[in-house]
Image (spheres, grey):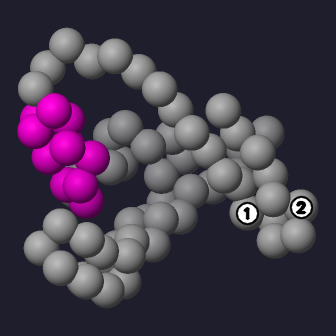
Amino acid sequence: FEKTKSDSGLVAFRGEVLIPVPLKKVANILVNESLQKDWVDSFVESRIVSKISEFEYIQYNQETLTK
């Protein structure tokens, strides 16, 4: 699901999927920055902006706009 926030120009998104593998394996792929180029459409850049705790951080992601 995708929705453009008209006041900011940002795109909010939500996705749902059933994956028949352990959650830990999926989570490791999602947080591994070096693998994001393999599964993020139109990937440009990703980096950790600040680390809050062992399991919480703020991440910057950039993708190209293709429509």
User: Which one is nearer the viewer's eye here, 43 or 58?
Assistant: 58
Query: Left or right of 25: which side holds 26?
Result: right
- Relative to 14, is 43 above or below? below
Vertical arrangement, residue 36 with respect to residue 62, above or below: above
- Of 59 and 63, nearer the camera is 59
16 in relation to 25, above or below: above
- Locate residue 60, reporting x and y percent: 45, 72
Where, quadrant-wise, is the C terminus in this rendering? Answer: top right
The answer to whether 40 appears left or right of 12 in the picture is left
> Whole-percent x and y of residue 59?
39, 71
Residue 16 x/y as whole percent: 47, 26
| Three-letter amino acid code of the residue under disc 2 | Ser
**Is residue 55 magenta-colored?**
no
What secondary structure is marked by label 2?
A: loop
Numbered badge on residue 2 = none
| Image point (41%, 21%), residue name | 17
Please give the residue where the numbered disc 1 appears in the rendered image.
10
Report if residue 26 lies within the magenta region: yes
Q: Which residues are magenta?
A: 23-33
Asked where in the image residue 6 lies, by quadrant, the reply is bottom right
Left or right of 5 in this view: 40? left
Q: Residues within 10 Å of mark 2 (few under 14, many from 20)?
A: few
Residue at the disc numbered 2? 6
The picture quadrant where one finds residue 64 is: bottom right
The local secondary structure at tag 1 comes to loop
The chief SS type of the magenta part is helix
Q: Amino acid at mark 1?
A: Leu
Q: Which residue is drawn at the image coordinates 73% and 63% (left, top)? A: 10
- CA separation in Å, label 2 and label 1: 8 Å
Residue visible at 14% across and 20% down in the picture: 21
